[in-house]
């Protein structure tokens, strides 16, 4: 039994957890089952799985001048959501009518927005966010109506009324002070009245009220932001796997659930591609020390993974391995770089000017080259910017060339117990070497809970399986 004090819970249901009528029904049961233990509950919902992708596809096709595709998507999404509502909400009831009307309105809005995009021939990030917010807005309505139908007082809340962000559309960041104020005003009040707010994940709004999104997969982040701003006691992320696992179970079928992880371990995993948590989710809960759980909507009886400040470290152990794809490794090389101050700063200044994020950096001690990894879609711009910045050095041949290898992947082994255990790296390389997998570059984060290796993309799946089976499973 929990003490009286522990009473505020934020739960988030991901796309597959609300991806069909039966999944939504299961998720609602989970919420209702917690109502006694947690008198104050906030539910955060994603769009039904696949819906955000459809909305993006519709808007991109409209921008390309295609007037058909978005209309087809509007019709199929109307039908999809309507069917779910007809399965879940009692016929001829007011709740059902209201939700159906809302769905029609939202998808008519989608068509109108796409029409404008098509006429203008341009899709701005701002328009894209308004368009992609529609999936969450519909789902929050459906979910709240279902809870109401079960007799729980509930209200759908658009996060654009609560999460205030900057205007970095498509990857917005929350502004802490106004979000805290609004969360208390809009949600705190509902909670005191024992109403369950069902809040749209993924979205927010600027101070001027323009809709923003927090980046793909951002509903996890929404839950963490609300957990922080509402001083929640716990945040639970409901998904379609049994918790955070030793590897992506789609690639490594014998992956196992990890019962406890620290914030830094899971932060490293999420940053390096474990899709189970949006990488920015960890920050708001770290700051307040709020325990975060990852649980399976379709297997709610098992505890899942608990993420907390400090997990138990077992010396020398690797807990999980993950991979991030779609990367290019850029190398700046030249014998004239040795000992010249400022080369690295100028290189990364040029990278930053392209808005490219650097996932990993490695510099050989001879200082004759710097290599770093960026998402492939940014690599051409990055190379051009560095060549421009280093034009003089290139002409003098202090720098010989700036070049990139495409189709790279970063594989990262994670575990706080690796700290100061030199043998771990040898075991990782041994596992890969045994299969003839070539490691192109390595880096160890300052937190020392991860070792990252750059490999060719075609080796990724085998590398994950080898590290998993030979290193992680041999921890035990
Ligand atoms: P949701 O829609 O619930 O947010 P996601 O698809 O975003 O779910 O994330 C869950 C998926 O993350 C799982 O189905 C799994 O395939 C993938 N995944 C990748 N790495 C891991 C990992 N280490 N542990 C668990 N799941 C992982
Ligand atoms: N629906 C959004 C997406 O597909 C956000 C999320 O699911 O977390 O990216
Ligand atoms: Mg997700």
Image (cartoon, helix red, strand yellow):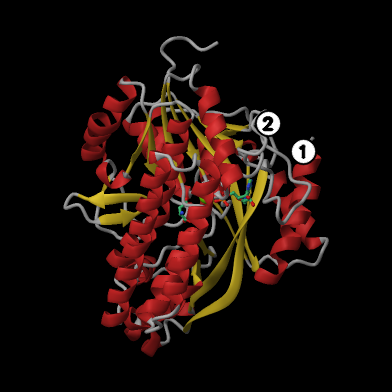
Residue 307 in sight from this viewpoint: no
The reply, left or right, for residue 9 in relation to residue 49 is: left
Identify the disc placed on residue 27: none
- Nearest the viewer among 454 and 326 is 326
Mark 1 = which residue?
475
Q: Which residue is mark 2?
A: 314
Q: Earlier in the sequence, mark 1 or mark 2?
A: 2
Image marks 1 and 2: residues in contact by CB distance under 8 Å? yes
Q: Quadrant of the N terminus?
A: top right
Mark 1, ligand 1, within 8 Å: the answer is no
Label 2 neighbour load within 10 Å: few <14, some 14-19, many 20+: some
The image position of residue 113, as x and y in percent, is 30, 69
- Examine the rendered structure and indicate whether residue 369 appears above or below residue 397: above
Element on which disc 2 rests = loop
Q: Quarter of the image holding residue 117?
A: bottom left
Q: Is residue 108 visible?
A: yes
On-image quarter of the C terminus: top right
Q: Residue furthest right?
A: 434
């Amino acid at each position: 039994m929990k003490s009286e004090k522990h009473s505020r819970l934020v739960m988030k249901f991901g796309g597959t957890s609300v991806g069909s009528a039966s999944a939504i029904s299961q998720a609602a049961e989970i919420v209702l089952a917690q109502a006694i233990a947690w008198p104050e509950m906030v539910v955060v919902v994603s769009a039904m799985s696949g819906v955000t992708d459809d909305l993006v596809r519709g808007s991109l096709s409209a921008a390309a001048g295609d007037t058909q595709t978005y209309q087809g998507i509007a019709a199929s999404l109307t039908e999809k959501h309507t069917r779910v509502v007809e399965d879940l909400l009692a016929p001829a009831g007011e709740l059902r009518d209201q939700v159906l009307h809302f769905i029609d309105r939202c998808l008519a809005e989608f068509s109108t927005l796409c029409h404008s995009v098509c006429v203008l021939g341009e899709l701005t990030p701002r328009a894209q966010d308004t368009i992609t917010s529609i999936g969450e807005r519909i789902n929050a309505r459906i979910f709240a109506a279902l809870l109401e139908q079960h007799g729980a007082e509930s209200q759908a809340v658009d996060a654009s009324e609560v999460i205030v962000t900057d205007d970095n559309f498509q990857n917005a960041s929350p502004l802490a002070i106004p979000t805290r104020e609004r969360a208390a005003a809009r949600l705190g009040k509902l909670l005191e009245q024992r109403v369950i707010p069902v809040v749209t994940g993924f979205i927010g709004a600027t101070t001027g009220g323009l809709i923003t999104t927090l980046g793909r997969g951002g509903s996890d982040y929404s839950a963490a932001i609300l957990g922080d701003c509402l001083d929640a006691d716990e945040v639970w992320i409901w998904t379609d796997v049994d918790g955070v696992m030793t590897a992506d179970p789609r690639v490594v079928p014998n992956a196992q659930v990890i019962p406890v992880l620290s914030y830094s371990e899971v932060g490293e995993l999420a940053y390096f591609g474990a899709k189970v948590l949006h990488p920015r989710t960890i920050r708001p809960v770290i700051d307040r020390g709020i325990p975060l759980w990852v649980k399976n909507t379709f297997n709610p009886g098992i505890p899942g993974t608990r993420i907390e400040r400090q997990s138990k470290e077992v010396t020398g152990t690797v807990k999980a391995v993950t991979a991030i794809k779609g990367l290019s490794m850029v190398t700046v090389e030249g014998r004239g770089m040795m000992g010249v101050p400022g080369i690295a700063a100028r290189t990364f200044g040029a990278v930053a000017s392209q808005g490219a994020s650097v996932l990993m950096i490695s510099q050989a001690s001879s200082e004759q080259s710097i290599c770093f990894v960026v998402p492939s879609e940014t690599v051409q711009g990055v190379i051009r910017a560095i060549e421009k910045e280093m034009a003089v050095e290139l002409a003098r041949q202090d720098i010989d060339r700036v070049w990139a290898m495409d189709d790279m992947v970063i594989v990262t082994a994670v575990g706080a117990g690796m700290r100061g255990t030199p043998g771990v790296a040898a075991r990782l390389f041994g596992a890969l070497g045994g299969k003839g997998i070539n490691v192109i570059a390595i880096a160890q984060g300052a937190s020392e809970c991860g070792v990252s290796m750059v490999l060719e993309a075609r080796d990724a799946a085998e590398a994950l399986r080898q590290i998993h089976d030979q290193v992680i499973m041999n921890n035990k």
